[in-house]
Every structure is written in structure tokens, then in C-alpha cells.
Amino acid sequence: MTTSNFSNSSAIVLDRVEVYDPTIQTIWPFKHVDDIVEGIKLNLCNMTSCYPFVVEGIKWRSSEELYLAGEFSNDTAEHRSIQEELRAAKSPYASKRFVKGKHRKEVRSDFPEFRTQWMLWCVWQKCKGNIDFRHKLLSIPDNVILVEETTTDTGGSGQIWGCSNRELVEVRKQVAKSLTEKYPDLTKKNLAFLINIKTNAIRNKGVYKGQNNIGKILIICRDCIKRGIEPDIDLNLLKSKNINILGNRLTFQS
């Protein structure tokens, strides 16, 4: 299936596989926190820690850490200890790779049942709690379909949160190699910036396939910010799951 209208959040269906065609749709893929597309820094992924926000009086460095805390949100001493460990990690990346990796067997068995709605709720808290993040979303043109590019991601969730596009990845890899060979005297920093600009300018190769739930959630949130409304989050589902964060059960008041 192909989503053709991203300007209205009501047209977006979460948890559905999409196939996006960049020859007829305006696709802005993002992966790294320093990706730049048409002059806009697409530091939109959950790992970005430059948009802190507060939930229930607790400050979170990133939406990734809050999301991960939901995986360990039973009302137990063990899960609270893991949540504290997630927050104490050096970075959101470290929280996911090392802390979650170590405790993978302790993840709530029912987490897949509510993970997408939980992610939508977490990202919306970041929108409400950080004006810079709201401005970032509003800087994305209305006709743009945001896609988290997860072709080379490991762990099995890449097709849930983003899309793969092997042809795009290979073309960009060749461009990066060519630039490295062409400009051997550039500093590492300047070469990286050049590669960033040139590779992110290539977006119309191949097709993007995956559920792209992160891209969809970002557009849903942007639409709600513009319209001054709340996203259609399944709060009843979240309430039913008894989600506890650092000793407090979330009530999910609308």
C-alpha cells in the first residue's frame, strides 16, 4: 500500500506496511541526528537528546529513553531498577544497546500490544514539552513524507519503525566513496559535511518499504500542533496496561 496524503493525519494508518515511490512523492528520509535536507537539520529520531522534556515532573533527555522505560514498566522493583539504569546511561544509544540489551529477557511480554500507541504518546509528550522540537516539526514542508531510513538496522524492528531502501543506500554509499577519493585533502569534519549534503540530496532512488511508524507519528504530531488538537491516542489501551514509570502509575488523562 502507498500513503499518498500525509498533509492530513487522519489519512495516516499506523502499523500498516507502506510502499513509498519517490518519483511521485516527496520523501525526506532521515537516519542520523546530523542529516541535512534542503537546509533543514533532520534531527528527528528518538535518539536525539537535544530536545529534553518533562513528564510527571521527571526530565527525559530523549523520547527513546521514555519509550524504553515502557518496555520495563511493570510495578516491580526489578523494572524500576532497570528504568533507573536506562536514565543513568551515557546516551539514548547506550540505553538501548547496552541497558536494554542486557535486560532483553525482562521486557514486558505484552509490550508489542501497545508499543505503537506508547510511542505516539511519548513523542507527543516531547512535542508538548519542548518548543524547539515543535518548531522543528513545523519547519518540515506540508507535502513531505518523513521516512526513517532503517535499511541497515539490526534487531528486527527496523521495518516497524521505518522503511528499507537498499537501492538508495547503495547509491549513497558510492557517492560517499567517490567524494572521499575526489577530496583527499579535506579535513575529516569538512568531508563528513560534504558527504552529508551530497548524499542527503539523493532521495529519489528505489522504493521505501516498511510500516514507517516513526515517520507517521512525527507527521501526526506536526498536524496536531498546527491544528491545536491532541493526537488520537488510544488512551484506554494505555490505561489498561498499568504502565508504571519510576514508581508512578501513569493515568493518561486526556
Image (tube, rainbow, N blue to C red):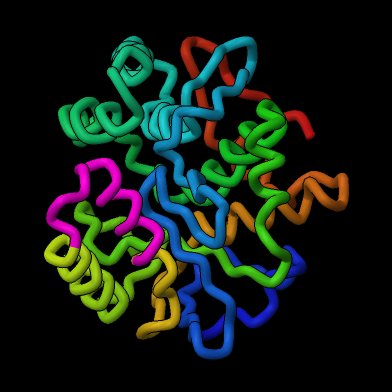
In the rendered image, residue 196 lying in the magenta stretch gets the answer: yes
**x, y percent for residue 247:** 49, 10
Is residue 116 at least partly visible in the picture?
yes
**x, y percent for residue 168:** 31, 76
Residue located farthest toward the front when viewing the structure as drawn: 185
| Residue at (50, 72) in percent of width and height | 16
| Residue at (70, 39) in percent of width and height | 134
- Camera-side residue of 91 and 122: 91
Q: Which quadrant holds residue 236?
A: top right
Q: Which quadrant holds residue 95?
A: top left
What quarter of the picture does the C terminus occupy? top right
| Residue at (51, 46) in percent of width and height | 44
In the rendered image, residue 26 lying in the magenta stretch gets the answer: no
| Residue at (21, 52) in percent of width and height | 155
- Camera-side residue of 205 and 80: 205
Horizontal relation, residue 94 to residue 27: left or right: left
Horizontal relation, residue 35 to residue 28: left or right: left
In this rendering, is residue 46 above or below 56?
below
**x, y percent for residue 37:** 50, 60
Number of marks present in the image shown: 0
In this rendering, is residue 67 above or below 35?
above
Residue located farthest toward the right when viewing the structure as drawn: 228
Query: What span is in magenta?
Result: 183-198
Majority SS type along the magenta span: helix
Is residue 114 at least partly visible in the picture?
no
**x, y percent for residue 100:** 25, 31
